[in-house]
Image (spheres, rainbow, N blue to C red):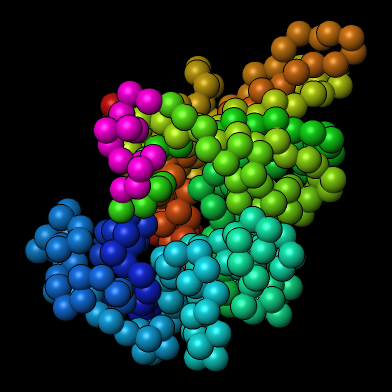
Amino acid sequence: MGKSKRAALIGGSGYGGAEIIRRLLLHPDVELVRVASVDFVGEPLGAAHPSLEGQTDLRFEKLAPKDAAAGCDVALLALPHKVTADKVPELLALGVKVVDMSGDFRLRDAAVYERYYGNAHPHPELLAGAFVYGLPELNREKIRAAQNVASPGCFATSIELALLPLARAGLLGGVVHVTGITGSSGAGAIPTVTTHHPVRAGNLRTYKPLEHQHTPEVVQTLADGGAPGVELRFVPVSAPLARGIFTTCFVELPAEWDEARVAALYDAYYADAPFVRRPKQRLPEVVAVAGSNHAEVGVAVGAEVGGRRTATLYAAIDNLIKGGAGQAIQNMNLVLGLDERASLEDVGSWP
């Protein structure tokens, strides 16, 4: 029996594209029918992604988005920020469902987009309601009903998963301090002066401190989750990892919120989230989730001091999967009315 749904991937030569292709080739219900790219045109997918050598007859094609998505149920976009915004209108006119991995349709405020992405948005009229923000742990039912989904950023995913239970409980407000450590694959397939292996290996360095483009995305999402007015102080750090993000958030809580009570809050929030784990014998770690769509979320709460407690909230994800391509497929499954877990249930490798 053939697969019931057809998908096109637009922008398939990068690391995120490789992960989408790999998982769609394994998908029980969705057939990948085209991969559009401006690179490797006419070449087999294995030319860009060696792990796909011999796994498919598909080749990279240079196609306009509307031609790539013709006859498909869904178009998955793995294009760079600022490029996607120009391409989306023709897909909306086509009527195909869209799952976008860029940052071009996550923010609802065009002025905020311009500040953090450096360009005026070419289609600000689409920011108000054309896309649903694709974090299933917050918006699952809205995603199911959506035509277009803006999948979250990798840092944003980890921070939001770490903080949303507090937001929902009304315990999040004021200034929240966050450090996020990320692997090199998040910088893309083409090396730069700061992402090239010789300067990345054995090194830790911060970049865009307090100005990272995921900051307003997180603030907007936490407000949607029940915490308006949060001020995020976010410092990202590049690490000598290929995959993974490890996030630590610092929050002040009332004294009555000890560790057991906070842990119970998180257990309840994520009880029905198929890809969020709450490890009981340890705190989250990257190697436990790398290569999978799973996230781990943990809490540690300090002793009472002056009627307050400091809580540290942790999240670990694979930046390319739950922080990117895997979450896009999770959203695709939801908008197509399929099992949310399809092609994503593997748990990665250990160690």
In the rendered view, tell whether residue 99 sits above or below residue 280. Answer: below
Tell me residue 6's x, y (percent). Answer: 36, 79
For the residue pair 328 and 3, the one nearer the viewer reads as 328
Q: Would residue 318 be visible to someone looking at this image?
A: yes
Quadrant of residue 114 in the image? bottom right
Quadrant of residue 9 in the image? bottom left
For the residue pair 112 and 148, the one nearer the viewer reads as 112
Tell me residue 284's x, y (percent). Answer: 50, 26
Q: Quadrant of the N terminus?
A: bottom left
Residue at image point 31% right, 67% down: 12
Quadrant of residue 123 in the image? bottom right
Tell me residue 168's x, y (percent). Answer: 78, 43
Q: Is residue 328 left or right of residue 227?
A: left
Tell me residue 167's x, y (percent). Answer: 77, 41
Residue at image point 55% right, 74% down: 85
In the rendered view, tell whether residue 105 sits above or below residue 14. Answer: below
Residue at image point 89% right, 9% down: 306
Q: Quadrant of the C terminus?
A: top left
Q: Is residue 332 left or right of residue 14?
A: right
Residue at image point 66% right, 23% down: 312
Dominant secondary structure (helix, strand or loop) of the stretch shown in magenta = loop
Residue 234 magenta-highlighted? no
Residue 195 magenta-highlighted? yes
Q: Is residue 345 left or right of residue 89?
A: left
Q: Would residue 290 be visible to someone looking at this image?
A: no
Total numbered circles: 0
Q: Which residues are magenta?
A: 191-203
For the residue pair 171 and 231, the one nearer the viewer reads as 231
For the residue pair 226 and 145, the one nearer the viewer reads as 226
